[in-house]
Amino acid sequence: MLPILLAFAIFLPWGLSFPVIPKALQDDLNFFQDYFHQFFFTKEESQKYSLEDQLRFLQHFFRLEETGWLDEPTKDLIRQPRCGVPDIADYSFFPGSPKIENNHVTYSIYNYPVGIKYEIVEKIIWKAIKIWSRVTPLKFRRVYTGNSDIDFAFLRGVHGDGFPFDGKGKGKGNILAHAFAPNPYYQGMVHFDNDEEWSYSYKGINLFLVAVHEIGHALGLRHSQDPNSIMYPNYRYQDTENFRLSDDDIKGIRVLYNSEYESQRRF
């Protein structure tokens, strides 16, 4: 906690016995704590840790220098667009390691985003699905009626699952999408924030890259600490034409689905 207290002490005015924290710094601290409570530990769970401990924990997870300060690299990272699924300390699976038991996986598309033709969206979703099918025994098939193992939907704000979206660039964490772990009693879901500027290029938010990430969650993977992994929490654009899963991604999905596939074929 000492570095944070020293930072506050810099702004201690003459003749006062308590620090006056500049509004910009207080806003940054509030943003960090909201972010930490949303993606790491709840407010109640965080009470046992100092602010410095929380900062070091986040910095360790994202492989930043563990300064214990709310420094510029940390502030920049927590304001980047990202997935809405909470983070954990190490690469892992959801509790209980849930997975889709049937290797024949069905999927459906509930609706489409604004600004992209539905034919292109369907091709993008299928391309993202094939990224995972090429390194696992899973075979995917689209269905048009009834329940599916995974349902894709583009939704806004409060949409009934308890995890509201925050709109384009407006919210704490700038959530792009989220997905739910496999569950034998409920349909799997991948939700995209329909207020985002979805695209199939480097402009806006690339739908293919986010879809690959969220499908990973729907299959049972949680976030990775490896910045090269598609399961890294924060969004970053990369080449989609020659996209390949990282070794970390392949190892995780193969452990979960006991796959012995040896290679990834290109599209």
Image (cartoon, helix red, strand yellow):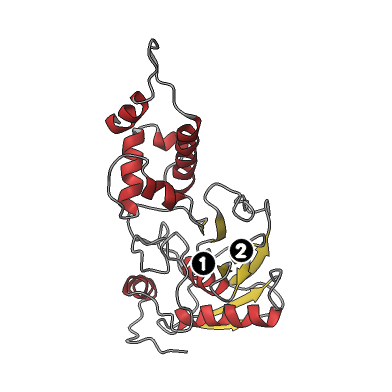
Of the residues under marks 2 and 1, which one precedes in the sequence?
2
Q: Nearer the viewer, residue 98 or 167?
A: 167
Q: Which mark is residue 232?
A: none
Q: Position of residue 13 (x, y in %)?
A: 40, 17
Residue 35 shown left or right of residue 69 in the figure? right
> On screen, 126 above or below 237?
below
View extreme (front): residue: 14
Which residue does the numbered mark 2 point to in the structure image?
192
> Where's residue 105, x and y in %?
54, 78
Kind of residue sitting beneath label 2 = Phe
Residue kind at label 1, given as amino acid type: Glu
Residue farthest along the top direction in this orientation:
15
Position of 12 compared to 161: left or right? left
Question: Which residue: 56% across, 76% down?
Answer: 201
Q: As drawn, is 55 to the left or to the right of 238?
A: left
Q: Marks 1 and 2: in contact by CB < 8 Å? A: yes
- SS at mark 1? helix
